[in-house]
Image (tube, rainbow, N blue to C red):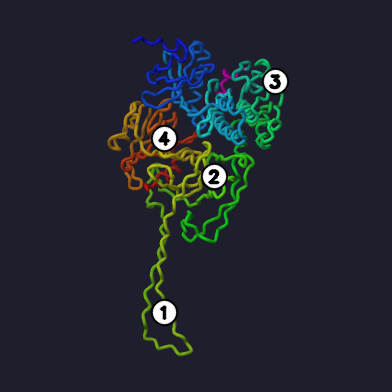
Amino acid sequence: MNEPPPAGTGTASDDVGRLIGERYRLQAVIGRGGMATIYRARDEQGGSLVALKLLRPEIAADVDLAERFRREALAASALDHPNIVPCLGTGTDPAGPYLVMALVDGEDLTTRLRRETTLPPADVARIGLDVARALGVAHRRGIVHRDVKPGNILIARDGHALVTDFGIARLADDAEGSVPGTILGSVQYFSPEQARGDTTTPASDVYGLGLVLYEALTGRRPWSGETSAAIALARIGAPAPSARALRADVPVALDSVVMRAMDPDPLRRYPDGTALAAALERLLVAPAAPPRAPRAAPSAATGSNDASRPTPPLPAVETPALLAASTGSAGSKGSGRTPAPVLVLLAVAGVFLGAVVVAAFPGIGNSAGAIALASDPGGATDQPRATPAATARPTDAPAATPSEPPPAPTPTPTPAPTAPPVPAADLCEPIFGFPCGQDAGHYGPSRFVPAVTFDLGQGWSTELHARDRVTLDRGEGRLTLLGDVTRVYPKGTEQAATGSLRKVIGKVAATAGTSASKVRGLTIDGHPGFSVDLTASGDQVVPILGMGEETVYLQPGTTTRFVLLDVGKRTLAIVIEPTGGASLQDILATADDVAGSIRLR
């Protein structure tokens, strides 16, 4: 057999089939950029598909550009957010430096705009909200993207947007990276300060996103020119034309947001992605519903613990302008409490969407923060029963006179019935990737297998609701249920999750690249299990559990709790992970109660 030439010496297609980093088998070219070629690759250790960005040989030979690529790896690995393409690792191969990212099933915004030219205003606002949230996370870490453009925005098949390619992102406070006179980025989406070679700030990313939203609304860019320099200089000191001047159905409120994002003066723009996200959020989320008045007749669908309490009616809802022109609603994920979105389907008659509001059942925690065992069997509330009175006995008292009627016999009271168990409400459905807020109450995800119920307090939202995975989110972190764990990764290699549960959790605790707490035994709803806290000891994500095509990774710099429960023929997993700079103890304060309330139906 003829040996292939050394990797990186021919065209990108020549490298297809090669093994990079002794782990990733290149399958196909899926993208090309100015610095790297992107491949779909298979992780030979984990079996999953990934996107591998391989630095082009001529770029790798340039020390400065290679350093810029290294910065991308550092920047991306430091960011953990649903709207940022996860960085899974980096390394160096004879073919050159490479970066491993999650593979997104979808297309970039450039491809979509090339096919559709313009997008509905509600879709533009939702994409902008996703991207602004992602940029906000980066900005809080001191990272400026510097190259926000449609090609760096991926649209997943479920509609939500993810930001990728921090190839020229650098730390905002890095003096070397902010030297005036150095121009980085795509000229069509430069901010005025980038065009002048001035220091870039988070407001520069806001400007770039404003240009992207403008193009998605109008099908054109606000400035043109015969040369790149002319295009870049045209925006210095010049306000962009209104999107409504080119497209009358653009809502005034959305046009105002886009115009402010593109203000030539960075001090008049939204200062960062978080501020822009807040402005877009107000366009997509309906105002809070007024208090519900009680209805006279009770309903079997009520979530009340009191069987005699009437069911509240569905409130009237004010519909924002963007929602009225859309088929979906976006949820809002805040820093601790997530308002429930209101989905208004005016075109569908007879569809009733009611939120069942029930009281949260507190779990039982302990000082160590371990998952507690709830003693309430299935969420029913015990009501006191009335004690029957003794039957009235005849007495020897004289008969009553005609003017005094005899007293009525004392009846035997009927014991008060015990209230029925609280019905489990289904989880709301995320729309276009936006988490949907959940009221406090008793829930049972309809699609999840095995069938479970649990209790939620205020502040939770549903990020994912699928057959094999449910992810509940709040500002401090997430709680994820995995229906059946089939793989673990001790010593960095994939193994089937077989044998005793104690043996499987031991393998999880032995995962290479992590430090583990002591394995603890527990019981939830009568099912035995074990838990362990893992902390990544390096600066790369580490695979921990696998299920079907899904792999759960441990993020660098975080401590995450992994719980495995024996539920018959399945191994149910509970993963509790902090996000947004919170600690494990921060999310355990509320996640413990949820985990302890889990019941198998």
| Residue nearest the observer in this picture, 170 or 101 | 101
Task: Please check the rendered image and state whether residue 129 is part of the magenta-colored stretch, yes or no.
Answer: no
Of the two numbered discs 2 and 4 in the rendering, the one whose residue sits closer to the viewer:
2
Instruction: Specify the quadrant of the image occupied by residue 413.
Output: bottom left
**Which residue is labeled 1 in the image?**
409
Residue drawn at the location 61% of the way across and 16% of the way down: 182
**Which residue is labeled 4 in the image?**
560
Cα separation between marks 2 and 4:
27 Å
**Which residue is labeled 3 in the image?**
234
Q: Which residues are magenta?
A: 171-179
Circle 3: is it few (<14), some (14-19), or many (20+) Cα within 10 Å?
Answer: some
Residue 330 is situated, as x and y percent measured from the top left of the image, at 56, 39
**Which residue is labeled 2 in the image?**
340
| Dot 3 amino acid type | Ala
| Dot 2 amino acid type | Ala
| Residue nearest the observer in this picture, 504 or 549 | 549
Count of number-bearing discs: 4
Mark closer to the chain start, 1 or 2: 2
Residues marked 3 and 4 touching at CB (< 8 Å): no
Quarter the N terminus occupies: top left
Mark closer to the chain start, 2 or 4: 2
| Residue nearest the observer in this picture, 329 or 132 | 329
Cα separation between marks 1 and 3:
98 Å
Mark closer to the chain start, 3 or 4: 3
Cα separation between marks 4 and 1:
67 Å
Is residue 292 left or right of 94 when viewed as pictured? right
Q: Is residue 124 above or below residue 373?
A: above
